[in-house]
Image (cartoon, helix red, strand yellow):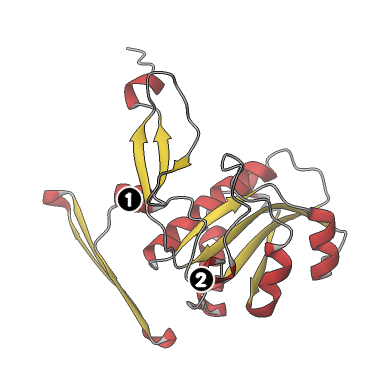
Amino acid sequence: RIWINLDSCNFTFHFSFCLGEKKKYVGVFMIKDLIRKNRSYRRFDSNYKISKKQLKDLVDLARLSASAANLQPLSYGIVYGESCKYVFNNLAWAGYLSDWDGPDISERPTAYIILMKDNEKNNFASVDAGIACQSILLGATEMELGGCIFASIDRKNLMKDLKISDENEILFIIALGKPVEEVVLEEVGIIGDIKYWRDAEEKHHVPKRKLEDIITIFS
């Protein structure tokens, strides 16, 4: 991995090689590029397999991320291969797309990361989980992958299917894969509708509030 920082022009040039996985990722990214490319993808190439090493590398990004009071209450379940069917069957897909029940078998995620916490009381575990999710998805974006965070989960049934101990509580699940859909960012319209939608060409449109509408300046 090679980093070249050219401070004089405020530019970061990043080559990333993952030769151990027989794959090579080469990209030129700044943080805004990664964030813009990091969308909620729900359709994937089911023939593209994500390795255990890639998943562990993504969890490591979460491990290194901030944690309130440094309590580090989170643990992570890595799911790939045949076990993916158990996770898929316990997720609710795209609440705003009422006529869509989720991707068909050729477009399903090929891996998942389950974010869990122990049952001890921790008022900030969900905050930690949000930070961890962002770190994982930015890392996935750098790998030319994509994902989607799920909170609508049949937790009881999934814990039974995967034999997860009752000492743990599932917070979120991140579905991962090689995206096969295009996501388009656009400004929220005059009526203020923030619901995502798909057009006739199956492009996924996501309205975002204008920057000037969310900033209050105190001077």
Residue 144's place in the image compared with 211, above or below, is below
Amino acid on which the number 1 mark rests in the picture: Ile
Q: Secondary structure at mark 2?
A: helix
Count of numbered circles on the image: 2
Q: Which mark is residue 2?
A: none
Position of residue 68 measured from the top left corner of the image (x, y, whole percent): 62, 43
Label 1, residues with CA under 10 Å away: few <14, some 14-19, many ≥20: few
The residue pinned by badge 2 equals 57
Label 2, residues with CA under 10 Å away: few <14, some 14-19, many ≥20: some
Amino acid on which the number 2 mark rests in the picture: Asp
Do the residues bearing badges 2 and 1 touch, measured as CB atoms within 8 Å?
Answer: no
Q: Quadrant of residue 109?
A: bottom right
> Which quarter of the image is occupied by the C terminus?
top left
Residue at image point 32% right, 21% down: 212
Residue that lies at the very extreme toward the front in this rendered image? 200
Position of residue 17 measured from the top left corner of the image (x, y, whole percent): 33, 78
Residue at image point 79% right, 61% down: 158
Residue 78's place in the image compared with 116, above or below, is below
Decide which of 62, 27 is in the foreground and name it. Answer: 27
Position of residue 138 measured from the top left corner of the image (x, y, whole percent): 43, 56
Position of residue 117 measured from the top left corner of the image (x, y, whole percent): 74, 54
Decide which of 169, 193 is in the foreground and name it. Answer: 193
In space, the residues marked 2 and 1 are separated at their CA atoms by 19 Å
First in sequence, mark 2 or 1: give its number: 1
Decide which of 211, 61 is in the foreground and name it. Answer: 211
Left/right placement of residue 200 relative to residue 98 reads left
Residue at image point 37% right, 54% down: 182
Q: Secondary structure at mark 1?
A: helix
> Which quarter of the image is occupied by the N terminus?
bottom left
Residue 146's place in the image compared with 84, above or below, is above
The residue pinned by badge 1 equals 31
